[in-house]
Image: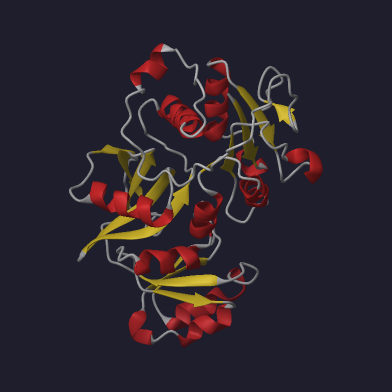
Amino acid sequence: MALAFLVEEHYRHDGMPLDVVRQLDAWGHHVDIVRPGSSLIELSDLIRAGSHDAWVLKTVSGGPGLSMLEAAAALGLTTINDARAIRSVRDKAVAAVIARAHGLPMPVTYFAAVPELLSSIPADAYPLVVKPADGSSGRAVHLVSTPEELARLGSELDGEGPLLAQVYVPNAGRDLKVYSVSGELHATVRRSPLHPGHSVRESRVPLPSGTAALMHRIGEAFGLDLFGVDIIEGPDGPMVVDINDFPSFRCVPDGVARVARAVLDLAAADAGVDRGVGTAVAKNVATMPTAVARTSLRSRAGVTPAHAGTTAIVDAASPAYVG
């Protein structure tokens, strides 16, 4: 198969997705790496209809890669995940509305176009967690105890764009991170960024009761295949605090092979393409459950793959792999 990975500079040396690219190459697949944040891209040549079996996005929330993925989707090409689903979780304001509309447990959330508007939040709503609506990787996340403390943040919030403020849910200082790899779930715990003083070793844990059903509901609500969810255990049960498309998948056993296999499965599902994996590791992960949602698979009726002999768009994963 031929795949195109949109990878921004933030992830230029990151094991996810670059190790996945290496794994796909080792299995005999062709992968082109597109770097939308550091390369001049001629759009007329970027998306050659039918030249790739699927497009994969690994970029920061506010990065330019999503526009490229949406361009591929607009031509009816397969994307992993669905471009509209990615957009819906990367704008955390949209994600909060979708979550609440589907009855998912998420804290009460306020939206403010500029920091000054946060001062209108009632004092009895504190403490609050304030973060950018397009944030990622824990950027500019603040636990704010009082209106006075919020006012003191001042310039730290300027330039972050629209902001969200969520009512803080008391917890034990650790986050549950649950990854869905095409429906196969893996749970890990890690220290909460809001409680840096707590000692929590990031590790795998058994999937808590009810979490599988919650993840299924999230997958259905957002239409994601590869995603991660940050969950905290509050006084009233689990609360969803963040949803990420194509996360790090840290602590997932054989994570690289599992994610690579999932990409191939999703790309091939509507095309009848032979995945051609054949390695021992791949065979070990070949019996994954049905995906939570298959909405990322675009119909490509009438499009004939023509990737044989094509050159990389920006730089080839192999043999001229640059990581």
Q: Residue at x 54, y 22 (%)?
A: 24
Whether residue 173 appears in this view of the structure is no
Left or right: 88 as drawn, with respect to 5: left
Residue shown at the point (36%, 78%) measured from the top left: 126
Quadrant into which the N terminus falls = top right
Is residue 184 found left or right of 278 in the rendered image?
left
Looking at the image, which is closer to me, 165 or 140?
165
Left or right of 2 in this view: 312:
right
> In this rendering, would 228 be left or right of 158?
left
For the residue pair 179 and 261, the one nearer the viewer reads as: 261
Q: Is residue 316 above or below residue 232?
A: above
Residue 154's spot in the image, x, y percent? 58, 76
Q: Nearer the viewer, residue 244 or 267?
A: 267
Q: Nearer the viewer, residue 272 or 22?
A: 272
Q: Position of residue 206 (x, y in %)?
A: 22, 39
- Total marks in image: 0
Q: Is residue 39 above or below residue 93?
A: above
Q: Is residue 149 visible?
A: yes
Colour mapping used in the image: secondary structure
Specify the farthest residue to the left.
209
Residue drawn at x 43%, y 84% is 121
Q: Residue 279: which quarter of the image?
A: top left
Q: Residue furthest front?
A: 302
Q: Quadrant of residue 104?
A: bottom left
The percent position of residue 11, horizontal first and vertical second, equals 60, 39
Q: Against 42, is 97 above or below?
A: below
Q: Vertically, is 192 above or below 25?
A: below
